[in-house]
Amino acid sequence: MRDRSACRMLVVVAVVAAASPAWATYTFKVIDFPGAANVELYGINNKGEVIGSAFDNNFKWITTFVYDSKAGTFTTLSSAPLLSESDGFGINDGDVVVGPVFNSQGLEGGYIRNKSGQYMIFTHPGSTVFTEPRGVNDKGIVTGWGDTSAGSVGFIYDPSKNTFTDIIPSTGSTIAQGINSRGDVVGSTYLPDGGAYAGSPAGTYGWMRSKNGAITYFRVNGNPTAARGINDWGVIAGFTTDPAAGNVGFVATLKGLPYEALTVAPGDLLAVPSESATDPEAINNLGAIVGNAFDSAGVVHGFIGTKGK
């Protein structure tokens, strides 16, 4: 059980509040699929291949695709047989893709698509409405979230053993998304008053679950925070809601304490130029990030951010 004593948690906050990670400037490229009104990007592997989905102006799904960021080309993926929609969320170096599938009634299950295009469909035990895989590492371990009677719960799924490990099931609002080759997982959850540490405010917190099961909650600049991707070096990408700027991105590392308050300088927060919100969703070992940017009209554009260029 996590130690939530007031003395320990106040010390932890004081220790990490001064942390201010410095990162190279990112250059952003907006990615729009030909003929689509909205584009969402959620995953990138270490080869620079990006997984995403294209939608029309009513957000009706058009196709799922892999974008080769080096060649600048799109490859569309065949959808799962007998299902109406197969969104793309995660991709590993073996070109295994994961995401949700929908039937004609709108019920959502999860899929794992191998390099040959074969689909495996699965559902999280106890989930009756949706199972949404969001990430897959190079060992084929999948992470995502599903519904339960108490709300949403994060999970880690090992398809070779057909076993699930639930993450933070008690809060009723948990998203698990990024997973690295070590098995570290990141996501977000809503916590009640005192849920992160003694005296902490209610709201959305980022979290990292190490392979041994220890969980670190954190916030960036004291604002609502969502962790979305983690690479093999332990660098986390996600977004925070800034009172003045709206959703802006961040990259950061954690020490592994029960709670960490991160301070990121304004110049190190990530924002796609000319867009009103920036939501990083994944990061690879080279530090490249992908995600979604929203313009003033609410149109979603995918983006790739590369550092040091």
Image (spheres, grey):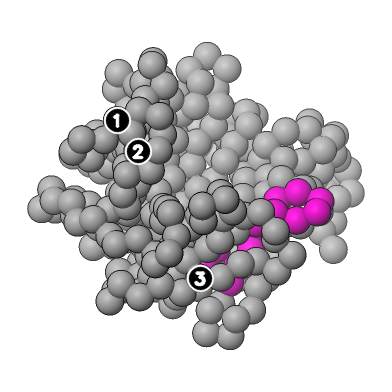
300 is higher (above) or lower (below) than 138? above
| Foreground of the two, 259 or 141 | 141
**Residue 89, quarter of the rendered image:** bottom left
Q: Is residue 32 left or right of residue 141?
A: left
Q: Residue at x 65, y 66 (%)?
A: 124
Q: Which residue is drawn at the image coordinates 61% and 50% (left, top)?
A: 175
Residue for badge 2: 55
Q: Secondary structure at mark 1?
A: loop
Which quadrant would the C terminus be assigned to in this image? top left
Which is more toward the observer, 80 or 180? 80
Residue linked to disc 1: 37
- Residue at which label 3 appears: 121
Q: State if disc 1 and disc 2 touch (CB < 8 Å).
A: yes
In whole angstroms, how far apart are the C-alphas of marks 2 and 3? 23 Å
* View extreme (bottom): residue: 161
Q: Tell me if mark 1 has few (under 14), some (14-19) or many (20+) residues whose alpha carbon lies within 10 angstroms of its own.
A: some
* Residue 237 vertical placement versus 97 (above, below): above
| Label 2–label 3 contact, CB within 8 A | no
Q: Earlier in the sequence, mark 2 or mark 1?
A: 1
Which residues are the magenta region? Answer: 142-157
Residue 80 lies, in percent from the top left, at 39, 64
List x then y, in percent, for residue 302. Answer: 32, 38
Q: Amino acid at mark 3?
A: Ile
Mark 1 is on which residue type? Ala
- Crowding near the residue tagged with mark 3, few <14, some 14–19, many ≥20 C-alpha atoms within 10 Å: some
